């Protein structure tokens, strides 16, 4: 097995729960039945700043059961209410089904796109919809908007009914598919998450409308990635990976134009047992590889940080898993 010198624990901000090694071993030994992943969607909301695009991020409350304290984007699980009939603009449901890797399942494709739009409104107060197929609402503030947003969060109002009552068309053309990650098999809460990019509509502004977040920030992807590298910002692998992908673009328009060429094949992690050592890796994303020597299962302590970073080697027991979560 080839390797390089390992970094010390906590030298970056990768979210790494201390219970993972035990769960990985239980999965490899056939003692853990993987949960079925739930479809989810999250949006990298962008705006042009003085030094390039900024991305909107929120910090999950430390009390959250999943990835507490980690920085993420607005997003959440697909809900059955996302399947209701809505006025639709942009690429057809058939086109989105192919783009999202859902074959001909147009119902599932609509639900994922609707979830992306709905969750962005629920958690950031930003709505990618307008009164006509080529317009977008300019202001989503005020008591009436807040009442609707709260009703959506409480699942008292179907998303389709919300759009219909306000005479709004869902603008699927304002979204660009960016990535797809699936939570590892050994995680009790699993998500099959599509990541989208979108520009902040003119006239609208973000606000921390999420009960799951204690902080929000507009930040350059390069600065957020730097904070992760220094161990100052905690993130899950899909979050930092998508951030790094944004760093190549000088404007929001450039990032949105690049979305169509992005590979949306799901990123699936692999957990291997090699001579008593656990090796956790995300194919195509070597920076997230973790080596956990036997007896070091609790070396992360309670911080959820990294143990050892090295190149992955060949293993004698391989399990396909997922790589990430709703982030």
Image (spheres, rainbow, N blue to C red):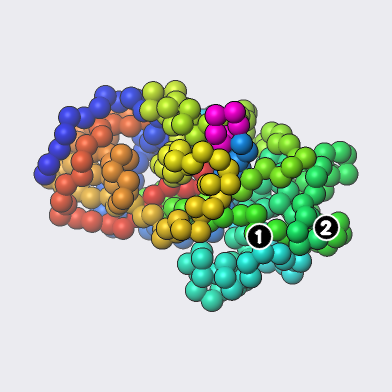
| Residue 54: image location, x then y, percent | 57, 34
Q: For the residue labelled by badge 1, is the local secondary structure a helix, a strand or a loop? A: helix
- Residue at position x 16%, y 34% from top? 4
The magenta span reads 49-54
Residue at coordinates 17% horizontally, 29% vertically from top-left? 5
**Which disc number belongs to residue 132?**
none
Give the quadrant of residue 142: top right
Q: Is residue 64 visible?
A: no
Q: Nearer the viewer, residue 259 or 253?
A: 253
Question: How many badges with numbers are in the image?
Answer: 2
**Residue at numbered disc 1:** 172
Where is residue 103 drawn, in percent x and y? 50, 74
Q: Position of residue 113 (x, y in %)?
A: 62, 59
State which quadrant residue 312 falls in: top left
- Most extreme residue toward the bottom is 104
N-term-proximal mark, 2 vs 1: 2
The residue indicated by pointer 2 is 131
Q: Residue at x 77, y 40 (%)?
A: 203
Q: Quadrant of residue 209?
A: top right
């Amino acid at each position: 097995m080839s390797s390089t010198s390992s970094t010390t624990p906590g030298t970056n901000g990768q979210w790494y729960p201390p219970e993972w090694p035990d769960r990985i071993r239980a999965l490899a030994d056939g003692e853990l039945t993987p949960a079925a992943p739930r479809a989810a969607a999250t949006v990298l909301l962008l705006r042009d700043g003085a030094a390039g695009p900024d991305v909107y991020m929120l910090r999950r409350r430390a009390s959250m059961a999943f990835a507490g304290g980690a920085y993420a984007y607005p997003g959440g699980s697909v809900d059955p209410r996302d399947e209701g009939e809505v006025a639709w603009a942009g690429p057809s449901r058939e086109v989105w089904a192919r783009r999202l890797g859902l074959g001909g399942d147009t119902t599932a494709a609509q639900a994922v796109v609707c979830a992306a739009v709905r969750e962005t409104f629920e958690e950031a107060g930003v709505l990618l919809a307008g009164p006509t197929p080529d317009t977008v609402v300019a202001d989503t503030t005020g008591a009436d908007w807040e009442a609707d947003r709260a009703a959506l969060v409480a699942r008292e109002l179907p998303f389709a009914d919300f759009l219909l009552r306000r005479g709004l068309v869902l603008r699927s053309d304002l979204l660009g598919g960016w990535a797809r990650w699936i939570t590892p098999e050994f995680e009790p809460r699993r998500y099959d998450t599509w990541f989208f990019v979108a520009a902040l509509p003119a006239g609208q502004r973000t606000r921390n409308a999420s009960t799951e977040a204690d902080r929000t920030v507009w930040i350059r992807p390069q600065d957020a990635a730097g904070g992760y590298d220094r161990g100052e910002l905690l993130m899950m692998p899909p979050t930092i990976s998508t951030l790094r992908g944004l760093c190549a673009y000088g404007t929001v328009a450039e990032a949105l134009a690049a979305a169509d060429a992005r590979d949306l094949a799901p990123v699936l992690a692999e957990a291997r047992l090699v001579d008593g050592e656990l090796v956790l890796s995300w194919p195509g994303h070597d920076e997230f590889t973790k080596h956990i020597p036997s007896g070091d299962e609790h070396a992360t302590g309670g911080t959820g940080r990294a143990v050892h970073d090295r190149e992955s080697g060949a293993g004698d027991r391989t399990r396909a898993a997922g790589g990430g979560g709703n982030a």
